Image (spheres, rainbow, N blue to C red):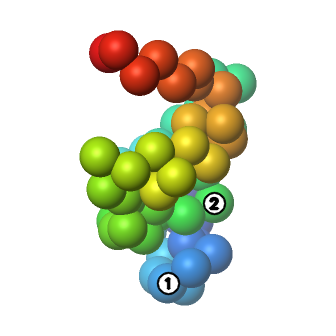
């Protein structure tokens, strides 16, 4: 098991490498994968644009 990290939303302490997404700069997200993706609607960009901004990933609607 790698480093442990607590999710800022659910408070659970989990394996940082397995349960948190990694940004381009190598840092991990503050929310675990489950909490981060919980309310995403693939057909509603308002539900995920904030995540793309945080992860420094461009939004290209055609893709």
Q: Identify whether 9 is placed above or below 20.
A: below
Residue under the point 56% across and 43% down:
49
- Any mark on residue 30, and which? 2
Q: Identify whether 58 is placed above or below 23.
A: above
Residue under the point 36% across and 58% down:
40
- Name of the residue lying farthest toward the bottom: 11
Q: Is residue 51 left or right of residue 62?
A: right
Q: Which residue is mark 1?
A: 10
Residue 22 image position (x, y, % from top left): 53, 37
Residue 10 image position (x, y, % from top left): 49, 84
Q: Identify whether 49 is placed above or below 30.
A: above
Q: Is residue 59 visible?
A: yes
Residue 29 image position (x, y, % from top left): 60, 51
Which one is earlier in the sequence, the residue at label 1 or at label 2? 1
The image quadrant where one finds the C terminus is top left
Mark 2 burial class by Cα count in 10 Å: few <14, some 14-19, many 20+: some
Q: Nearer the viewer, residue 52 or 30?
A: 52
Total marks shown come to 2
Residue under the point 62% across and 48% down:
50
Secondary element type, mark 2: loop
Q: Nearer the viewer, residue 23 or 13?
A: 23
Residue 23 image position (x, y, % from top left): 60, 32
The image quadrant where one finds the N terminus is bottom left
Secondary element type, mark 1: loop
């Amino acid at each position: 098991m790698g480093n442990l990290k607590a999710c800022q939303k659910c408070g659970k302490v989990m394996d940082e490498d397995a349960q948190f997404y990694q940004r381009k700069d190598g840092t991990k997200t503050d929310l675990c994968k489950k909490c981060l993706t919980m309310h995403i609607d693939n057909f509603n960009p308002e539900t995920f644009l904030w995540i793309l901004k945080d992860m420094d990933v461009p939004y290209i609607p055609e893709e």
